[in-house]
Amino acid sequence: MANFNLDGKYLKDGNSVVAEIDNSFIRDKNSKRIAEFNETYIRKISGEIIAQIDGSYVKDNHGKIITTIDDIKNDIDDAEDSALVALWMLFIKK
């Protein structure tokens, strides 16, 4: 079972870095940009929308509610909402 925590701008699983928040980008453990986020959308670098923030809800690319900001904060916290959603979509969502 993963043990995610946010340490500054780094998402860690235990002591291992799995992602980094870099301004409006998410980088993987190899520092490769894998996603971009803003207040509303989380997109893969290819441009594909993977999530939308709609108030306190997180919707998938078809508009279906998949979780809430509060639920994500149960897994990770201490970052702006869009960064949290990006990290959750890319690394935690099952």
Image: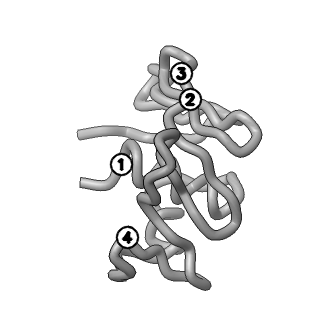
Sequence-wise, the earlier of marks 3 and 1 is: 3
Work out whether residue 23 or residue 12 is closer to the camera in this orientation and state it.
23
The residue under label 1 is which amino acid type? Ile
Sequence-wise, the earlier of marks 1 and 4 is: 4
Looking at the picture, how far across and down is residue 50, in whole percent?
42, 58
How far apart in space, not on screen, are marks 3 and 1 (Cα)?
18 Å
The residue under label 2 is which amino acid type? Arg
| Quarter in which the C terminus is drawn | bottom left
**Which of the 4 quarters of the picture holds residue 67?**
bottom left
Work out whether residue 8 or residue 85 is closer to the camera in this orientation and state it.
85
Sequence-wise, the earlier of marks 2 and 4 is: 2
Residue under numbered circle 3? 32
Looking at the picture, how far across and down is residue 65, in whole percent?
37, 81
How far apart in space, not on screen, are marks 1 and 4 (Cα)?
14 Å
The residue under label 3 is which amino acid type? Lys
Residue under numbered circle 4? 60
Residue under numbered circle 2? 33
Sequence-wise, the earlier of marks 4 and 3 is: 3
